[in-house]
Image (cartoon, rainbow, N blue to C red):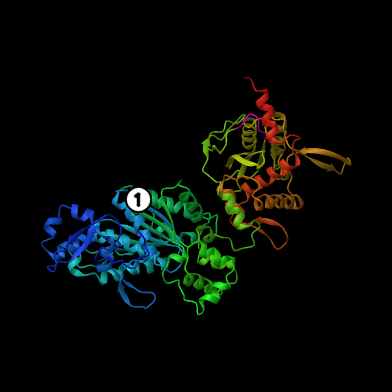
Amino acid sequence: MSLRRTDYDPVAGVGCLGPRVKVKTPFGRGDEAFVPEAMVRDPQYGEARRSMAAWKRLRCRHDFEYWCATCATIRDKTSGRDVRFILNAPQRRVAAVLEADRTAGRPIRMILLKARQWGGSTLVQLYMAWIQSCRRTNWHSLICAHVKDTSSVIRGMYTKLLADYPPELWEGDERPEFKSFERAQNVRVIAGRGCRVSIGSAERQEAIRGSDYAMAHLSETAFWPDTPTRSPADFIRAVSGAIALVADSLVVIESTANGVGNFFHAEWIRCKEGRGDKHAVFVSWHEIEIYRLDPPDAAAFVAAWGESERALWDLGLCVDQIYWYAVKRREYSSPHRMMAEFPTTDTEAFINTGSGVFPNEAVERLRAACEAGASVPVEPFGKSDRSTPMRRWRAPEPWRRYVVAVDVGGRSAKSDWSVIAVVARGELPEVVAQWRGHVDHDILADTAIAMARQYNDALLAIESNTLECEAADSNLFVLARIAARYKNLYRRHSYDAATRELTTRIGFHTNRATKAMLVNTLIGYVRDGAYIEHDSDACNEMVTYEARSNGSFGAKRGYHDDILMTRAIALHILEETAPALTPAEERRIWDESAPR
């Protein structure tokens, strides 16, 4: 069924969601309507046909779109008038996902990535209002946005709904309105239904923790502050985890995009890849009916099309949509800013608008090979951090050579991560395993040794800055420990000023010069698609990595580059230590020498 159809009539049930049957309405005029099958199966259906009001109330209970068109009043953004809520095309697509869960008896879970001005928040809020008004009593909800004013605006839709609700269709023993709840400033209760509606903000999370919610609308989560004391990830998981996995329970996380690397982006990727509990739904600008504009001279406009306009045409867009996009784009200083506000794809929505180092298009091509991988315990030589397994995408192959790169972070949870990456040699080098965590450095060393042994005694390269620069004898002990327990180590040439001799030292030392060399090497690999990445977090770090005004490189404030640096080190070392034989030749020799 096409959602952009001209014959949509929610009162007649034409073009509406779900399986429907054609019935005669009990209005005495021979009218007919397409109603949900579930309504006809309802035990109260026969009795309800004796009364027009009872029949309408029963239909409202089963038919969200009919309820919107007959009971819900909203303020139209274009005209400013109060109108009944008739779902537009993207709202019907989102409602279809919500209804698929509800009618199947599943908990309703969604993450919604939005373009602007199509009523996504309105749709979610009124869907919750429908459940509380028609389907459930004592079914409490939470509305939480990045600031309290936004939450208040969303709840304001609810206040208007109750004020204009048709009294004859209200299923409560009191007239529809909000009442105060035990003098709580941020909580209202729906009269006659016993359903509480609470509002809150990401700025004051402690005010809404621990309450009894069956539904949560978490709005503009990409803009929620992420600080050492206020983590959107922790708060959203706490709220979601407290909502029971039962029918008609609901969690919707929705937002416009705000870059990558934050909780909303990470959760979007997780759910889009099928690893999360929510349906990932993206609404593009061209799904929104108001984003159309007739060109004054269509032939001249089409004749002047460039690559971007032709790409939109190839997607199936009409000339009036493409012209609107071309006119709107003039308001923005760069194409990237336009794409962030009015995305055509979810990739565009998250696109980086800063001074990024890695081309976004190339990073997204790299992301195509990303996958969850298997969680595999690491059994280090010596002590172990058994609570942190490695992620493995490819098991060791006996004939293949590998490089293990280690970026050394801190021990505490607030410090940089330590990362161990295993990269396989090949026509296209491939990231095959990774460990990430916070541990003491001797445990990190043992973990790296264990992973290197598992991957055919791989060449082990440890970024040695932290170990050499921290003034502690224990760190020198760690380097000595590694040298004593593992032989296939990467060693760099170093000039000793005291002896005026060229020596070798364990590990790769990054300074301003060597870091620029590493980053430029990685830029080439990413741009040319010359290696295979499996970790989406590595891609996230690439799009938040920037060139600074002083000529240095680094992650944006609040982001990390630990995973990225292991790729840069490993790929540089693969080039520097390339063997005489190609991987294909090594495979052939192995096959020929293998016992038969």
Number of other residues with Cα within 10 Å of mark 1, as a class: few under 14, some 14 to 19, many 20 or more: some
Quadrant containing the N terminus is bottom left
How many circles with numbers are drawn on the protein? 1
Residue found at x 47% / y 68%: 318
- Side of 472 relative to 495 (left or right): left
Task: Indicate whether residue 520 is drawn in magenta.
Answer: no
Tell which residue pokes out farthest to the top in this image: 596
Image position of 586 with respect to 282: above or below: above
Image position of 183 with respect to 451: above or below: below
In the depicted view, which residue is nearer to us: 202 or 58? 58
| Residue 499 rendering spot, x and y as whole percentages | 88, 40
SS for dot 1: loop
| Residue 456 rendering spot, x and y as whole percentages | 65, 30
Residue found at x 36% / y 49%: 242
Quarter of image, res 544: bottom right
Quarter of image, res 586: top right
User: According to the image, label 1 marks what residue?
Assistant: 243
Q: Main secondary structure of the magenta part?
A: loop
Three-letter residue code for mark 1: Ile
Residue found at x 51% / y 67%: 341
Tell which residue pokes out farthest to the right in this image: 500
Q: Is residue 473 visible?
A: yes
- Side of 300 relative to 35 (left or right): right
Q: Is residue 136 visible?
A: no
Quarter of image, res 75: bottom left
| Residue 120 rendering spot, x and y as whole percentages | 40, 64
- Side of 360 relative to 83 (left or right): right
Residue found at x 15% / y 52%: 43
| Residue 36 rendering spot, x and y as whole percentages | 24, 57
Point out the stretch of residues depicted in magenta.
396-401
- Side of 64 relative to 89 (left or right): left
Quadrant containing the C terminus is top right
